[in-house]
Image (cartoon, grey):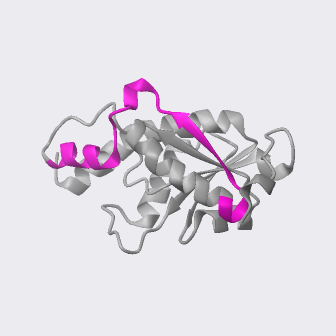
Amino acid sequence: MDLTQRPVADPAGPPSARRALCPGSFDPVTNGHLDIINRAAKLYDELFVAVFVNPSKAGLFSLDERMEMLAEVTGHLPNVSVTSFQGLTVDFCRTHGVGIIVKGVRAVSDFDYELQMAQMNYGLEGVETLFMPTNPLYSFLSSSLVKDVAKWGGDIDGHVPAPVAARLVARMGGE
């Protein structure tokens, strides 16, 4: 496939370029995720926040729970829709008329992986990827790290939205 012939998505151009996707497992959603979602919502007319299902990976929270938490913490954003999807990201984009995938990157290690995904998505469907640097306050933060801290009774306030913290503490058997 000759990638030089692919059109470049123009944010001011076709309707699909005004619809973006912010995918993730969100198990659970962190303040880092929420920061990226809030910032992306300012850039696009419509933003899908999709919980992507990985059948080979059991999550701490069910798909429904993750979607509920996301809906709760993004409810103030009128242009954000929370949904779920299983399969190729570009299939979701094609089905929903999305032209841009928004990915937060914390460090070079994130970028290395996400760049490969972006190139594959562009090669398959011509879908562009916007890499959004994480706010430095959250550059160390991951769902896995938050779960580990919660598991051992550490303070997760400031790392996840309050409703998520309550669910996480309850799930981990804390007080």
At horizontal 84% and vertical 50% (from top left) the residue drawn is: 15
Q: Position of residue 156 (x, y in %)?
A: 26, 37
In the rendered view of the protein, which quadrant contains the C terminus?
top left
Q: Tell me if residue 149 is in the magenta stretch.
A: yes
Q: Is residue 27 left or right of residue 150?
A: right
Give the image quarter of residue 31. Answer: top left
> Which quarter of the rendered picture does the N terminus lie within?
bottom right
Residue 17 inside the magenta-drawn segment: no
**Residue projecting furthest to the left:** 152
Q: Position of residue 41 (x, y in %)?
A: 65, 38
For image coordinates 70% across by 55% down, the residue present is 127
170 on left or right of 122? left
How many numbered callouts?
A: 0
Q: Is residue 32 left or right of residue 79?
A: left
Q: Which residues are magenta?
A: 123-151
48 shown above or below 57: above
Q: Which residue is depicted at the point 41% across and 74% down? A: 55
Q: Quadrant of residue 92?
A: bottom right
* x and y percentages locating residue 23 in the rendered image: 54, 54
